[in-house]
Image (cartoon, rainbow, N blue to C red):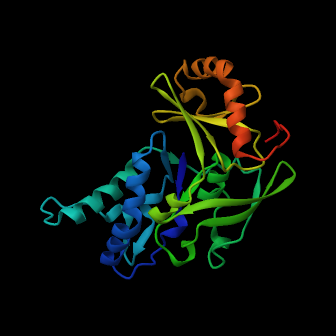
Amino acid sequence: MNYFVNEYSLRGQFNHITEFFDSLRAYTLPVLNKIEAEEGSVIWKKDSLWSCEVCKDCNLGKIQPHKNERNPALTKLKLSLVKLYRKPVIWSEDENNLEDSFEYKFDEEYREKFAAQNCFTEACKHEGAILSFEHPVYKMDCLRLTAFMNEERYEIELDNIYSIKWWERSPEIKKWMVDKKYLIEIRGKEFEYHPPHFHVSCSEYQAVFELKTGELYTGSGERMPPDFQRDIKRWYDQNKAELEKAWDSLHPPITYNTKL
């Protein structure tokens, strides 16, 4: 599963750094721990997440554990933050890849300031969920937006996670583990502009394959190990019927559409 850190949910809303730590302890840290325990899950964040403002004159990049820290709980919080923004799984704005447009139906105060490419557009592209820090605007289970893609209009609801309670209502997923190496998933909640497909994770690599053909739909491109696609195609050829049955059990009947 892909999770995208909401860079707009951290914009100096906390009155003091201790208030921010209390929020991390109650909301964000349990979510991070839950995601890290999931096999095949990846947390993506914007390359400039470290500069997000926590409170006046303090951003994420300034929060570091001290050598003589005497509070183990506080040290754990700080280490979790450092790990979050330093881990090399990032996305960067690409001005040459902005063919689609979006209308946001949330964060009325700030949405005009959203960059054309942001965590929400990335989550739409990769069928991911949003991971938000505690913020009054983002205490909701889903974020609604309209996407205009390939001359079509789509109404989309992005899962928004700010509390561990989200997993009480998380969508159903059917999973297979192949060769103790590849995690294959068919998810119960998918975006309608994608053709039927299945997700594959292997270490830090993730890809999506079309259910109809078994061919790569989206993925890490040249970063993938050379045997990744070959192994998945071989498994697909032997298990296509089972995959199709799983898809049909989780989705209403639809017509195959290979157009993104």
Disc count in the image? Answer: 0
Depth check: give the residue in front, 168 or 63: 168
Spot occupied by residue 185 in the image (x, y as percentages of width and height):
59, 37
The answer to whether residue 210 is seen in the rendering is no
Spot occupied by residue 131 in the image (x, y as percentages of width and height):
51, 60
Spot occupied by residue 247 in the image (x, y as percentages of width and height):
70, 39
Spot occupied by residue 132 in the image (x, y as percentages of width and height):
50, 64
Depth check: give the residue in front, 61 or 141: 141
The answer to whether residue 194 is seen in the rendering is yes
**With respect to residue 173, does 82 lie above or below?**
below
> For residue 260, which quarter of the picture?
top right
Depth check: give the residue in front, 41 or 187: 187
**With respect to residue 240, does 144 lie above or below?**
below
**With respect to residue 22, does 229 lie above or below?**
above
Side of 151 where 73 appears, left or right: left
> For residue 138, which quarter of the picture?
bottom right
